[in-house]
Image (cartoon, helix red, strand yellow):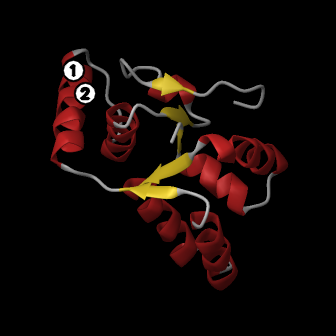
Amino acid sequence: MSYLIDSDWIADYLKGRLPAVEHLQSLEPQGLSISLISYGEIYEGIYFGGQPAATARAFRQFLRAVDVLPLNRTIMRRFARIRGELRCGGQIVGDPDLMIAATAIEHNLTLITGNSRHFSRIADLRLYQSEES
């Protein structure tokens, strides 16, 4: 695996937005994964979105090409360290995003996100750079 896909890119992919679809398809041979946190965030969108059945089908299809990485004690300890360091510096980042970042760091993955400004606060986190990001 080389990349962890953030929820915003997954949502764009499921909506058929070409930049997300093309980029993720081009990166698939290098290995794609998502955090269990993104899995939950996407299902929230499915349950409360306009076309739950169609979106759920598309997401199940998407999941065939990616690994879903669970949280574990090591990731949660990394999350706690990142969260504490940011809080001490007066910077608040939402817990779900911190857990996604901790997962990427722990598995030595590059995070694909449209929210680089937000995630760039996190030391040791590699962010995917593209023209569309």
Residue reaching furthest to the right: 18
Q: Position of residue 88 (x, y in %)?
A: 18, 18
**Dot 2 crowding, Cα within 10 Å, few <14, some 14–19, many 20+:** many
Q: Where residue 110 sits: x, y (%)? A: 51, 31
**Rendered residue at 58%/45% (across/down):** 31
Left-right relation of 105 to 81: right
Q: CA distance from mark 1 to mark 2?
A: 5 Å
Q: In the orientation shown, which residue stands out farthest toward the bottom?
A: 53
Label 1: few (<14), some (14–19) or many (≥20) C-alpha neighbours in 10 Å: some
Tag 1: residue type? Glu
| Mark number, residue 82 | 2
Q: Position of residue 108 (x, y in %)?
A: 40, 31
In the rendered view, tell whether residue 47 sits above or below residue 108. Answer: below
Q: Amino acid at mark 2?
A: Ile
Of residue 109 and residue 119, the one placed in the foreground of this image is 109
Relative placement, left or right, of 1 versus 121 is: right
Between 102 and 68, the one lying in front of the other is: 68
Q: Quadrant of residue 56?
A: bottom right
Say if mark 1 contacts mark 2, CB within 8 Å. yes
Residue wearing tag 1 = 85
Q: Secondary structure at mark 2?
A: helix
Q: Residue furthest front?
A: 29
Q: Position of residue 25 (x, y in %)?
A: 74, 49
Query: The C terminus is located in which quarter?
Result: top right
